[in-house]
Amino acid sequence: MLFVLGLVPLLGWAVVLIGFPVMVAGMVLGCHDQAAGRPLRIEHLFAGLRVHSGNLALVGVFYLLGGLIAGFVSAIIGGGAALTGYVVGALAGLGLGLISGVVLGSMVFSILWVLLITALWFAAPLVVLRDTPPLDAMKLSLSACFGNFGAFVLLGVLIYVLIWVAMVPAGLGVLVLVPVLAGTLYASYQDIFGTPPALPAPSDAPTAE
């Protein structure tokens, strides 16, 4: 459904970005039920529409606004670098200015986008499983990702590689990758935010007779 909406220019992509946390929440709820021994059902895909849908949509709105701000800031910085190259000098200087502007703008956008992804990663599970307000959920997600920076970087690299691998067989690998990513998200959420398992009660030490 979200893929079909994404084919609509501009408005479709806005709806996709806003609805993305809702879809993720449904998959997280499915993983949560399965971990509790309950069966996984097709209805879990739409569970995010029934549980905290308003807050989940707000997470999507903040995600959309963050992407727009990242694009705007990178364009301003990149354009400023290109303009500096134009003012400084001749034709060669203009070329260098344009190149440096594109490179700098791309770097700034990439950094801001990574920050946005880290803020989004745990946001949906926090909203749907812990009833955390949207902005607080994104702040907690950002803090958790940077608190586990090495693991998050490794996970990001693996996901990047898996996405390319999944696209090889005419994109059909995505049908396998999406459930894997949902399970990965839930497992990482439980590892950081879940209640640690209770330690077994110590057995009584044998008494010497």
Image (cartoon, rainbow, N blue to C red):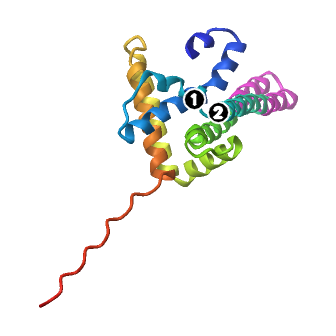
> In which image quadrant can residue 100 be found?
top right
Left or right: where does residue 25 sit relative to residue 172? Answer: right
Label 1 belongs to which residue? Answer: 48
User: Given the image, on which type of amino acid does mark 2 rest?
Assistant: Leu
Quarter of the picture containing the C terminus is bottom left
Is residue 40 at all visible to an observer of this figure?
yes
Taking depth in this image into account, of 121 and 167 the one nearest to the observer is 121
Mark 2 Cα-neighbour bin, 10 Å: few <14, some 14–19, many ≥20: many
Q: Which residue is mark 2?
A: 56
The CA distance from mark 2 to mark 1 is 8 Å
For the view shown, which residue lies furthest in the right direction?
87
Magenta stretch, residue numbers:
76-105
| x and y, in percent, of residue 130 in the image | 58, 46
Q: Taking 60 as reference, is 196 above or below it? A: below
| Nearest to N terminus: mark 2 or mark 1 | 1
Q: Residues within 10 Å of mark 1 (few under 14, many from 20)?
A: many
**How many marks can you see?**
2
**Dot 2 lies on which element?**
helix
